[in-house]
Amino acid sequence: MTKKLSWKELKVGDILEGGSSLEFKTGNWRSKRPVHIPEKCIHCLFCWISCPDNAIIVDSEKGKFVKFNYDYCKGCGICAYECPKKAIEMKQEGEQ
């Protein structure tokens, strides 16, 4: 197994392969996580368009919220802030 170089070990101007961010799951950084409340959701998708990490999965055929991709959600809370119906609550990690 070949050891991957850290960004500090790369040469100046080095080129990285595309799509490398998919290899780095960042969801373990968060202390709070979003929780969807389906009965309040109107599927406006403000959460989806506002998410800086593309961590909200939408059914493209139906145009509806499906779930959060917690592997990449950093728990910033922007989705909950932008939701006009308060259908997303931020909970402490580990809380039900």
Image (cartoon, rainbow, N blue to C red):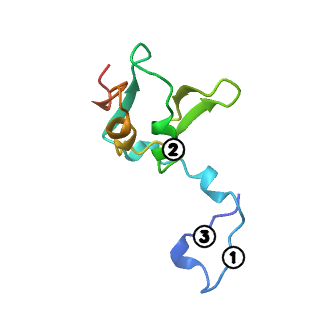
The mark nearer the N terminus, 3 or 2, is 3
Q: Is residue 57 visible?
A: yes
Residue 30: percent from the left, percent from the top?
A: 36, 43
Q: CA distance from mark 3 to mark 2?
A: 33 Å
Numbered label attached to residue 49: 2
Q: Secondary structure at mark 1?
A: loop
Does 9 sit above or below residue 86? Answer: below
Question: Residue, x 35% and y 35% (percent of image)?
Answer: 80
Between 35 and 79, which is closer to the camera in this rendering?
Answer: 79
Between 63 and 25, which is closer to the camera in this rendering?
Answer: 63
Between 96 and 1, which is closer to the camera in this rendering?
Answer: 96
Identify which amino acid the numbered label 1 is placed on. Ile
Q: Secondary structure at mark 2?
A: helix
Residue 48: percent from the left, percent from the top?
A: 51, 39
Q: In the image, is 94 to the left or to the right of 50? A: left
Q: Secondary structure at mark 3?
A: loop
Residue 29: percent from the left, percent from the top?
A: 38, 47
Looking at the image, do the residues carrying marks 1 and 2 touch, with CB atoms under 8 Å apart?
no
Identify which amino acid the numbered label 2 is placed on. Ile
Q: CA distance from mark 1 to mark 2?
A: 29 Å
Which quarter of the image is occupied by the C terminus? top left
Residue 57: percent from the left, percent from the top?
A: 58, 33
Q: Residues within 10 Å of mark 1 (few under 14, many from 20)?
A: few
The mark nearer the N terminus, 1 or 3, is 3
Q: Is residue 71 visible?
A: no
The mark nearer the N terminus, 1 or 2, is 1
Which residue is denoted by mark 1 in the rendering? Answer: 15
Which residue is denoted by mark 3 in the rendering? Answer: 5
